[in-house]
Amino acid sequence: MKTFQIKGSTGESLLLIGEKIGSLAKYVPADRAIIITDAHVEELYRKKFPPWPVIRIGTGESAKTLDAVKAIYGALLDLEADRSSFIVGIGGGLVCDVAGFAASTYMRGLRFGFVSTTLLAQVDASVGGKNGVNFEGYKNIVGVFNQPAFVVCDISLLSTLPEKEILSGLGEIVKHAAIADIDLFRFMEANTENILDLDPGAIERLVHDSITIKSSIVNQDERESGARRKLNFGHTFGHAFEKITGKSHGEAVSGGMMAAAAISVQRGLLSGAELKRIETLLHRLHLPAAFPVDRRLVLDAVKRDKKREKENVHFVLLNGLGRAVVESISFDDLEKAYILT
């Protein structure tokens, strides 16, 4: 097992790569623990759950709402949860987001931790202290920064995932490599078959390196006022693609990365050869490089992005593979650049 630590303003978070779900009791006050999960995860792993009360939420983005959180509050009241209770979110990114937000706001905050059961959650969604829900069709627009006490990344759980879930996680891993680690990018180029076959050694390397990158950035900038903005590479357009097409988060970010990389080429920051390497890697990993959607719908969604400041958006570009820069770009300039991609 490998461990990382994030030191946030709300506390320290221990990231446990290779730990098992069966070891949860080592990290949780068993007499006060309450599990939040969804029906699908419970069906797969209930036999591995400790004997603690379970609150079930729905599946899909319709479960990531304030109404879902309201139902959790009601269940917590029924269980007589108080400030000594400990919430354990077991599931993918959606479960972790909702569980973390509910825990952070119930009685002004309970302690909580996660068992991440998807590749996306292990490398991104459950790491870094962002907890939130969607509102009026826009992703993560209501939320808090609050670090989980721990995140268990049980690699063995990934073998049950459908291909779409694997691809979603791979999209975020390519992002991490593109913004911060050329060696990880080269590893993915050289090991695409092993990665798609879920070779344990290859997957553990991807999870380890992704968490190394993200935890390092979050430790510098927990609340996304500087360096952490780099983690949004591909997300400005990616969130728009996700909303319009219904594709998974990682697949949508894949298309968003290509748009951002193409704009990086326009601005003389990235070479055409490097852009081609990104496109080739995405194709080899069965990830989309573009979406045939109405560009007016995309640009309208981009203007509602939570990263906007008045008429500008903090947009992440590549200054070569493995190096990201953040520029404040006006929506007019971004629209012109996007039309040329």
Image (cartoon, grey):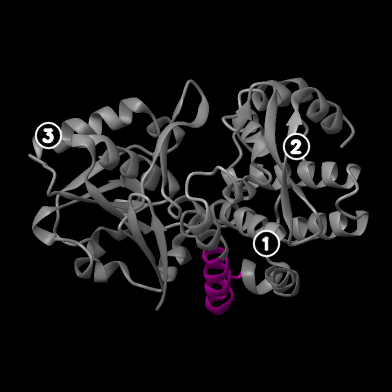
Q: Horizontal and vertical percent for residue 110?
A: 21, 45
- Mark nearer the N terminus (3 vs 2): 3
The image's mark for residue 77 is: 3
Q: What residue did someone put label 1 on?
A: 180
Direction from residue 179 to residue 57 in the image, left or right = left
Whole-Å distance between the Cαs marked 2 and 1? 25 Å
Q: Nearer the viewer, residue 248 or 97?
A: 97
Q: Amino acid at mark 1?
A: Ala
Q: Horizontal and vertical percent for residue 210?
A: 57, 64
How crowded pointer 3 is (Cα within 10 Å; few <14, some 14-19, many 20+) is rated as few
Q: Tag 3's secondary structure? A: helix
Magenta span contains residue 285: no
Residue at image position (33%, 71%) is 20
In the figure, 70 relative to 229: above or below? above
Looking at the rendered image, the quarter that the C terminus falls into is top right
Q: Tag 1's secondary structure? A: helix
Q: Determine the image quadrant of residue 177.
A: bottom right
Magenta span contains residue 203: yes
- Mark nearer the N terminus (2 vs 1): 1
Q: Amino acid at mark 3?
A: Leu
Whether residue 309 appears in this view of the structure is yes
Q: Amino acid at mark 2?
A: Phe
